[in-house]
Amino acid sequence: MKTVAVILADGLEEVEAITPIDFMRRAGIDVVTVALKDLLVKGSHGINLEADVPLEEFPRDADALLIPGGMPGSAHIAADERVINLVKDFHTHDKLIAAICAAPSLVLGTAGVLKDKQYTCYPGFEDKAGPYGDYSGERVVKDGNIITGCGVGGAAEFSREVIAALIGEDAANQVMKATLQSGY
């Protein structure tokens, strides 16, 4: 069974965290939610989420790392050197890294893993990725081991791409069909 670690920080965009978590669990992927600080994480719209483990207990055997967007959640994650080092380590080992909204620019840009990669993010954040990456206005972009999404409106498509990369197109399409996404 594949395992995905999802980083949660105060100020995250709830839809960008909950949709991938829900869709991946529907697909049979083991999802471990990881908190930067306290296990109780407050979203940017006042919805509280409870993480499974603190960052100190990060599942080192995780197959993928997923980072929701939102502000100031993405900024909190980007400022945490422990997470930046995890992103770099996942990239070095060619493990899947997925980020959505402001997280591709702020977190992946800070880690320097967008070099020579195409990516997308929330419009207006593309200049925050530093000197790295080739911004695309697409809703979801997969380039090698990195999947990026544009934001809340693309959360289902982003989740689908993560599932497809981890366990295949059929499983991803089944989740999309079961959740009544158009075109599946």
Image (cartoon, rainbow, N blue to C red):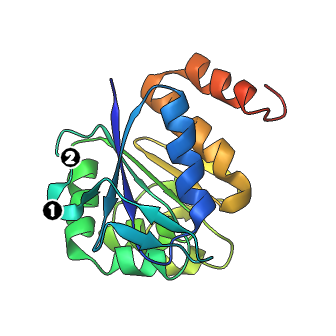
The kind of secondary structure element at disc 2 is: loop
For mark 2, does the 10 Å Cα neighbourhood hold few (<14), some (14 to 19), or many (20 or more) residues? some
Seen from the viewer's position, the closer of residues 19 and 148 is: 19
Residue 92, numbered circle: none
Quarter where residue 85 is shown: bottom left
Quarter where residue 167 is shown: top left
Q: Residue at the location (48% across, 68% down)? A: 103
Residue 27 as seen in the image, left or right of residue 123: left
State the separation of the CA atoms marked 2 and 1. 9 Å
Find disc 1 in the rendering and name its residue: 56
Decide: is 30 above or below 99. above
For mark 1, does the 10 Å Cα neighbourhood hold few (<14), some (14 to 19), or many (20 or more) residues? few
The kind of secondary structure element at disc 1 is: helix
Q: Residue furthest right?
A: 182
Find disc 2 in the rendering and name its residue: 59
Residue 84 shows up from this direction: yes
Where does the image place residue 33, in percent across and percent down from the top left? 36, 53
Seen from the viewer's position, the closer of residues 23 and 173 is: 23
